[in-house]
Image (cartoon, rainbow, N blue to C red):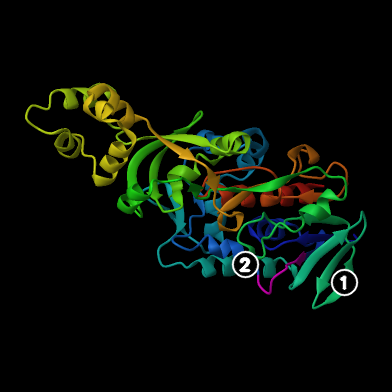
Amino acid sequence: MTKKTIAIIGGGASALMLASTLNSDKYIINLYEKNAALGRKFLVAGKGGFNLTHSENEVDFATRYSPTTFLAPFIAHFSAMDFRTWLSAIGINTYVGTSKRVFPTKGIKPIQVLRAIENCLANNHVNLHYNYTFNSFTTNELTFTHHHNEVAVTADIVVFAIGGASWKVTGSDGAWLNIIKNKGIDTENFYPSNCAYKINWDTALIKIIEGEALKNVTLSCGILHKKGEVVLTTFGIEGSGIYALSAAIRPQLLATQVAIVYIDFKPELSTKNIVELLHNRGNLSIKDVLQKKIKLNTTHIALLKHSTTKEEYNNPQQLCTFIKKYPLHLTGVAPIDQAISTVGGIALHEIDEHLMLKKMPNHYAIGEMLNWDAPTGGYLLQACFSMGKYLGDRLNAM
């Protein structure tokens, strides 16, 4: 049987899983990477803890993605538990942290995870081509720049896995967008996700709250809400709690240049509880009640004092409203290159249910090239690995 040739463009999570999964008895597998090494952005995810996936139940897991209907089949095909089993099989054991996030067993470094995956590629006879920058393509040819020379490549099947547009230092710069767009394929401009948001803080207030964390709060925007932690900065606000609301914040910012996020400083206390504590304060000052009874800190109190009138601050019901629904007005986003991930890229209506470009048979796209979104917590990597695994199994079955 004559083997077909597959060209995979990109060396990130989705490409690595695809190359590991493909049947090398059936295909000649060529992977073209822009950098001198694989997995540059994959390793960035390892800074501050290598969160590979999440242990959440499968039903809730699928709801973390936007749009849910697009990614659900791929997550169902290769779930978080499937991923952990696969990692174990290549020598990477994992554990569930207190936040239900999944990490490599303590002592295993990110580079060790990458090396284990690279061993899979070697065992699967994957041909690795480094320093290949993707330039253009036709239905039957790809062109790259390799050490200042143009190189033409042909393949029976092409898989684009070139990534999004953040962390340019890793090679993920989104430069491919116009190449794809010029082929008549609909695309969406890239936009930061899982990023810091700008708040025009009062100068006096930011001197008090800059660098402070708000822990165990619940944030909400539109229909989305998230319990977590955020950090207040001179620029605005950042942290997992706000990142999880990106899908709701983004359309508001794009439409009106302002998005409103509400923070519940004390989600464990009901409105009734707080009003009663403020109303029945006896000889205690309002500040004493806030600190000693409601357990707010100086950052909470500074925010409350800045945003309320004297009358509102002295009124238990009105002050409680600010404690349970403190408004933040977001006016912008951090630069795209500082974002953890991006939305935008190839419009989802341009691919079929098997990740093939409808306008270009035998050409597929996977990973962050496609216009989907997910919060931090292991969901981003899981989706990329799931798409790679799904497509690999699909091509093996053809």
Q: The disc labelled 1 sits on which kind of residue? A: Val
Nearer-the-camera pick, 366 or 179? 179
Nearer-the-camera pick, 366 or 58? 366
* Residue 32 within the segment the image draws in magenta: yes
Residue 39 visible in the snapshot: no
Closer to the eye: label 1 or 2: 2
Neighbour tally class for label 2: few under 14, some 14-19, many 20 plus, Cα within 10 Å: few
* Residue 272 within the segment the image draws in magenta: no
Disc 1 marks which residue? 151
Residue 15 visible in the snapshot: yes
Residue 365 falls left or right of residue 257 = right
Image coordinates of residue 33 in percent, x first then y, are 73, 67
Image coordinates of residue 26 in percent, x first then y, are 82, 58
Quarter of the image containing the N terminus? bottom right
Secondary structure under tag 2 reads helix
Residue at the bottom extreme? 147
Q: Which residues are magenta?
A: 31-37
Residue at x-position 82% and y-position 71%: 145
Residue 211 falls left or right of residue 363 = left
Q: Look at the picture and state if 49 lies above or below 343.
A: below
How far apart marks 1 and 2 lie (CA) works out to 24 Å
Image coordinates of residue 183 in percent, x first then y, are 88, 49
Disc 2 marks which residue? 169
Residue at x-position 74% and y-position 73%: 131
Q: Quadrant of residue 134?
A: bottom right
* 1 or 2: tag closer to the N-terminus: 1
Residue at x-position 91% and y-position 56%: 138
Secondary structure under tag 1 reads strand
Nearer-the-camera pick, 347 or 362? 347
Image coordinates of residue 280 in percent, x first then y, are 13, 23
Q: Look at the picture and state if 64 lies above or below 191.
A: above
Q: Look at the picture and state if 290 lies above or below 160.
A: above
